[in-house]
Amino acid sequence: MQLVHDVAHWRAYCEHERARGARIGLVATMGALHAGHATLFDAAKDHGDVVVATLFVNPRQFNDANDLSRYPTSRVEDRALASAHGVDLLVEPTLEEMWPDYPNATPTTVSVRGIGEHYEGDSRPGHFDGVTSVVAKLFAITGPCRAYFGEKDFQQLTVIRRMVADLCIPVTIIGAATLREPDGLAMSSRNRYLTPEQRGQALVIHRALQVAQRLAASGESSSEKLHAAMRATLAEEPSVRIDYAAVVNPDTLEDLDDVGRGGLLAIAAVVGGTRLIDNTLVAVPPQPGPAS
């Protein structure tokens, strides 16, 4: 595995690999890597020839300075995990190269209106502008590739897909299923913040999604009732503060009245001082076939 810190070597490496016919897979991370990231590296290796991973804690997507300052870092462990899972080029760009104007505002910002303005957008003003701006930059430097993102950050995935489509960026976006701990907790770098007691409390998030998902599978299509079921379950842990519990269209992230044609259940909640997100899809119920 090669390790680089500057944009020039990163771009030259990708151009050289494409020139020899290699298919590049890109995995963008902020470090604090875990098994969920490893599955993205594995998928990129399985479906391509060269895996490029970026490790950059992007300050422009944090609207809380305290959240940025306490974001976990584990550089040595991250490099070892990336190497063990087939990453060919690990890029750890400097803040000076990525955002030379920082902490002043960057004149150019990529913004996806509509789908980026609700839920995470409401709770974290400016967050998605920071995400789309840095991801657009990663894509511009890497060039044509397949880029892998986890479905736990479903709104982020949807926003990036829209950005790529609207700007005709030559990158194929691949979503990967959320990886969970044995107890059901969605894997996240932020789980490191949780005390053992808080980790037990956090399980209510996945439990609430499961309750609503089972309700939908039993034939309930009312979003109002699914929403109520999620909130009632979350209330079983009074110390867990609900940010939102939503039932939305997975393509547009607009609120749904019913899930008769499928939908996405999404929750954001604060456990201790840690904000966690999770989601699950509601499958379209099978339709009865024609009478024979």
Image (cartoon, rainbow, N blue to C red):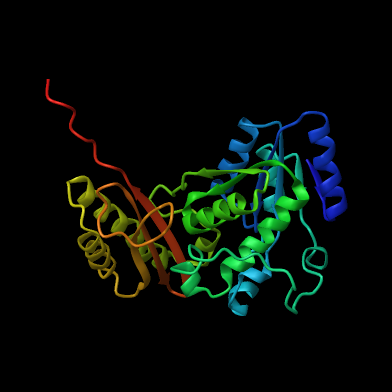
Question: Farthest left residue?
Answer: 291
Q: Judge whether residue 5 can be spotted in this image.
A: yes
Q: How many marks?
A: 0
Which residue is painted at 27% across and 62% down in the image? Answer: 230
218 vs 268: above or below: above
In-image side of 138 versus 277 (left or right) = right
Which residue is nearer to you in this view: 212 or 205? 212
The quadrant of the rendering that contains the N terminus is: top right
121 vs 253: above or below: below
Q: Judge whether residue 75 can be spotted in this image.
A: no
Which residue is painted at 56% across and 49% down in the image? Answer: 149
Which residue is painted at 57% across and 63% down in the image? Answer: 112
The quadrant of the rendering that contains the C terminus is: top left
Which residue is painted at 63% across and 67% down in the image? Answer: 130
Question: Farthest top residue?
Answer: 292
x and y, in percent, of residue 143 in the image: 75, 45
x and y, in percent, of residue 68 in the image: 63, 73
In-image side of 16 versus 69 (left or right) = right
x and y, in percent, of residue 89 in the image: 77, 43
289 vs 105: above or below: above
Tell me which corner region of the image, top left, top right, bottom left or bottom right, holds residue 111.
bottom right
Which residue is nearer to you in this view: 57 or 263? 263
In-image side of 283 versus 76 (left or right) = left
x and y, in percent, of residue 270 in the image: 42, 72
